[in-house]
Image (cartoon, grey):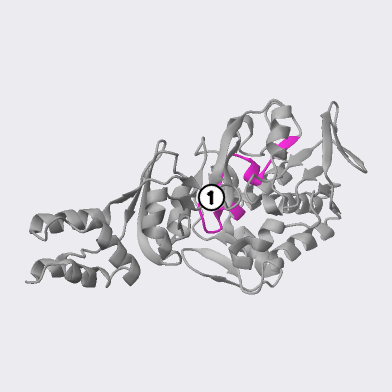
């Protein structure tokens, strides 16, 4: 078996196949394995999420991921982590991180590959792939032949660590459809006017609720932190919403979720900008509260004016100009069309022996360890079918 890609999915698949006695060669085009693992989670690898469920994933076919996720769960990977003596902790919302370093996860996967006698080849840039009775993979220096080829080459996100379109190009070579790709879990940029109004507050963050309309699944809302950047908006709530955002769509931001900032103003005999600023600064960072009121203060401080202010605070509509692109995207949405693959094995329906796993497939998880869990689950599904 030949596995293309030494990231999370490729390493897991190679290790599992090697464990079962398969002869496995893993080809990684860069000079080290697991580069995306090593930079994930702030260097501590958010390696899974306890609350993994199908609703935590985007895909043109929302049912596709269910089978693999059900057959290899977060508890399965946690058992592996514990078997290797890796200390870990839950940070929030079911997100599990290594206590020490993300290299604990790459070391684990490398150890599993060694135990399965997996032949890992670094700096292996594939020049061509042919298929007749078997797959023939040619690099600059070697030729590999196998009846099974697993493509785990990832998406387009973070090109500085080697992301390329190779997996999509290979799928097209074999006649497979590609769902159009786009950056996901990515900061949003603002228009020139909004940047002028807000981006000098770069570094300010607030707990908000961010909502965006999704054509397939209705409104999606995320209650987490929002961070103002030099070019726009980021932070977990924005990154989550970005996966559903489409150009031209507004994003709705509730700056005071679950709160009624105008309550004290309504009771007070003093209703003015200073009083409103004082009330709002109890909820938002002071600089953001002051700036937002400078730009959104009601025309009058009557009950009707306070109604409008309250409404605007809960439904601040922002029209992003775009995203920060693949350079800053954590993952790539879209990819190999799941209609082309078996949900049980990840094998291409049109090309027996050809498998696609991990990020290259049109399955994209929410922020918080879900994409790693998809990598593990899809890898195991392919490996165990061989």
Residue at screen point 72% across, 57% down? 34
Q: Is residue 348 shown above or below 105?
A: above
Residue farthest to the right, as pictured = 141
Magenta stretch: residue 121 in it?
A: no
Could you say where residue 18 lies in the image, as x and y percent from the top left? 81, 51
What residue does disc 1 label?
324
Residue at screen point 22% across, 73% down? 278
In the picture provided, is 213 more to the left or to the right than 7?
Answer: left
Residue nearer the viewer, 71 or 370: 370
In the picture provided, is 154 more to the left or to the right than 52?
Answer: right
On the image, which quarter does residue 355 sit in? top right
| Badge 1 density bin: few <14, some 14–19, many ≥20, Cα 10 Å | some
Could you say where residue 274 lies in the image, as x and y percent from the top left? 19, 71
In the picture provided, is 172 more to the left or to the right than 2?
Answer: left
Magenta extent = 354-372
> Circle 1 — which element?
loop
Could you say where residue 121 lies in the image, as x and y percent from the top left? 86, 51
On the image, which quarter does residue 254 sit in? bottom left
Magenta stretch: residue 356 in it?
A: yes
Q: Quadrant of the C terminus?
A: top right
Residue at screen point 34% across, 69% down? 287
Q: Quadrant of the N terminus?
A: top right
Q: Is residue 87 shown above or below 258?
A: below
């Amino acid at each position: 078996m030949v596995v293309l890609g030494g990231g999370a999915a490729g390493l897991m698949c190679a290790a599992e196949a090697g464990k079962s006695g398969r002869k496995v060669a893993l080809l990684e085009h860069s000079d080290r394995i697991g580069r995306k693992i090593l930079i994930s989670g702030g260097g501590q690898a958010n390696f899974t999420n306890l609350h993994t469920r199908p609703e935590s994933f985007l895909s043109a076919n929302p049912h596709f991921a269910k089978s693999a996720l059900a057959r290899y769960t977060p508890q399965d990977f946690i058992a592996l982590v514990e078997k290797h003596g890796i200390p870990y902790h839950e940070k929030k919302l079911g997100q599990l991180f290594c206590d020490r370093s993300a290299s604990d996860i790459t070391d684990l996967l490398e150890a599993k590959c060694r135990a399965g006698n997996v032949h890992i080849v670094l700096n292996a840039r594939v020049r061509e792939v042919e298929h007749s009775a078997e797959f023939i993979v040619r690099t600059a220096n070697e030729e590999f032949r196998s009846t099974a080829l697993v493509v785990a080459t990832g998406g387009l996100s973070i090109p500085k660590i080697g992301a390329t379109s190779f997996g999509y190009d290979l799928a097209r070579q074999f006649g497979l459809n590609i769902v159009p790709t786009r950056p996901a879990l990515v900061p949003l940029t603002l228009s020139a006017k909004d940047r002028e109004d807000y981006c000098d507050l770069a570094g300010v963050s607030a707990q908000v609720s961010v909502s965006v309309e999704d054509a397939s699944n209705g409104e999606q809302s995320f209650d987490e932190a929002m961070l103002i950047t030099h070019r726009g908006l980021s932070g977990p709530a924005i990154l989550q919403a970005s996966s559903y955002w489409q150009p031209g769509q507004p994003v709705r931001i509730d700056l005071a979720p679950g709160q009624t900032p105008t309550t004290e103003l309504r009771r007070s005999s003093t209703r003015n900008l200073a009083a409103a600023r004082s009330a709002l600064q109890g909820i938002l960072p002071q600089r953001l509260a002051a700036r937002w009121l400078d730009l959104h203060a009601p025309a009058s401080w009557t009950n009707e004016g306070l109604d409008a202010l309250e409404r605007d605070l809960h439904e601040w509509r922002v029209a992003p100009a775009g995203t920060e692109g693949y350079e800053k995207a954590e993952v790539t949405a879209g990819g190999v069309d799941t209609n082309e693959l078996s949900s049980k094995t990840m094998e291409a329906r049109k090309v027996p022996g050809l498998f696609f796993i991990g990020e290259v497939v049109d399955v994209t998880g929410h922020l918080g360890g879900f994409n790693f869990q998809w990598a593990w689950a899809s890898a195991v599904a392919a490996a165990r079918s061989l």
